[in-house]
Image (cartoon, rainbow, N blue to C red):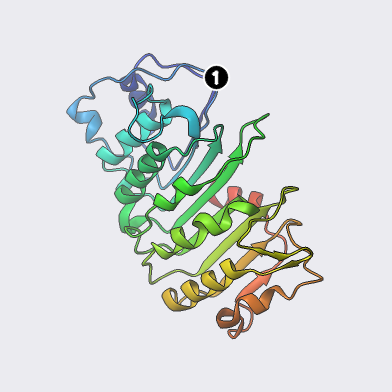
């Protein structure tokens, strides 16, 4: 495994040449740090066509403010954007099995350009992708009101053999905006497991969930139940970790999943250990 963090390459070409020094590389992790991203550089045909046949797992962080909102002048492309461009133009993306993308929020603006970058990589992975993890986090010190409406643009339709989908640390008040939309884009006929974890919040609950003080309805989960039951006949387990966002002792959560709950044991409410996925994928 290689973890790229806290370093500087003058040009993308140097970065790619470095990665290509490890022909038996299986796992690549890219961490955003306070360093200068390499400048764009034309890659030789050999580098563009280079393959790392054993590489099947990539983890990367995409920071929201590294790009401008759609229609504005593009910002300097960061390291991870360059890498995505290389992965999608080479043979590598076509045999990636596991992809972990962490989306870091640093702005109240919806960043559609970064979502388009994520979609390019998902499309290039195509039917080879079997496991996908999407984690949301906020930058240290960022506490403004924000949404994830731009994530509605994520497309999973090219990943027809997706078996496992993990969505971690989803802020509770954003779920009705994008969660069912993303999952409905998948046309996988091999989906086996799905994990969802939510972040607790002290803010007011969304209007579409609050119906009166102390009483909440979960229409978004009934919508999700219909999508999962209708689109994924192979789904055998849905793990949900509310992390204190709801009082699980006061509400019968399963009643909001009537179709999946009819299949005994499919919906599991409890603790989801995000860290357990890292060693499974060969990540630190």
Q: Secondary structure at mark 1?
A: loop
Give the quarter of the figure containing the C terminus. Answer: top right
Between residues 173 and 77, which one lies in front from this camera angle?
173
Q: What is the x, y in percent for residue 113? A: 38, 37
Between residues 36 and 147, which one lies in front from this camera angle?
147
Asked if 256 appears above or below 60 in the picture, the reply is: below
Q: What is the x, y in percent for residue 143? A: 67, 34
The residue that disc 1 covers is: 34
**Looking at this rendering, what residue extends furthest in the right direction?**
249
* Quadrant assignment, res 88: top left
One can see residue 99 in this view? no
**Looking at this rendering, what residue extends furthest in the front direction?**
212
170 relative to 189 in the view: left or right? right
| Residue at point 53%, 69% (across, down) | 224
| Residue at point 81%, 71% (across, down) | 250
**Looking at this rendering, what residue extends furthest in the top direction?**
10
* Quadrant assignment, res 41: top left
Asked if 15 appears above or below 156 in the picture, the reply is: above
| Residue at point 49%, 35% (across, down) | 109
Between residues 92 and 104, which one lies in front from this camera angle?
104
One can see residue 16 in this view? yes
* Mark 1: few/some/many CA within 10 Å (<14, 14-19, 20+): few
27 relative to 142 in the view: left or right? left
Asked if 147 appears above or below 177 in the picture, the reply is: above
Q: What is the x, y in percent for residue 35? A: 50, 17
Asked if 145 appears above or below 158 in the picture, the reply is: above
């Amino acid at each position: 495994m290689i973890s790229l963090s806290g370093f500087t390459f003058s040009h993308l070409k140097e970065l790619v040449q470095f990665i290509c020094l490890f022909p038996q590389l299986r796992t690549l992790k890219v961490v955003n740090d306070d360093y200068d991203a390499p400048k764009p550089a034309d890659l030789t045909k050999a580098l563009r066509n280079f393959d790392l046949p054993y590489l099947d797992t990539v983890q990367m962080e995409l920071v929201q403010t590294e790009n401008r909102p759609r229609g504005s002048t593009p910002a300097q492309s960061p390291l991870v954007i360059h890498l995505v461009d290389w992965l999608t133009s080479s043979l590598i993306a076509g045999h990636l099995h596991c992809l972990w993308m962490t989306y870091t929020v640093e702005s109240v603006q919806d960043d559609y350009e970064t979502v388009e970058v994520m979609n390019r990589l998902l499309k290039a992975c195509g039917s080879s992708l079997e496991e996908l993890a999407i984690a949301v986090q906020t930058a240290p010190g960022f506490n403004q009101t924000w949404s994830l409406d731009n994530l509605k643009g994520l497309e999973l339709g090219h990943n027809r053999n997706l078996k496992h989908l993990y969505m971690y640390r989803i802020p509770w008040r954003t779920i009705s905006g994008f969660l069912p939309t993303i999952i409905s884009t998948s046309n996988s006929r091999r989906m086996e497991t799905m994990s969802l974890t939510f972040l607790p919040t002290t803010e007011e609950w969304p209007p579409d969930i609050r119906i009166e003080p102390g009483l909440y309805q979960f229409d978004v989960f009934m919508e999700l139940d219909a999508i999962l039951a209708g689109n994924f006949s192979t789904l055998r387990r849905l793990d949900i970790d509310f992390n204190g966002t709801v009082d699980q002792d006061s509400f019968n959560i399963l009643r909001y999943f009537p179709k999946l709950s009819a299949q005994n044991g499919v919906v599991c409410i409890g603790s989801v250990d995000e860290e357990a996925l890292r060693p499974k994928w060969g990540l630190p």
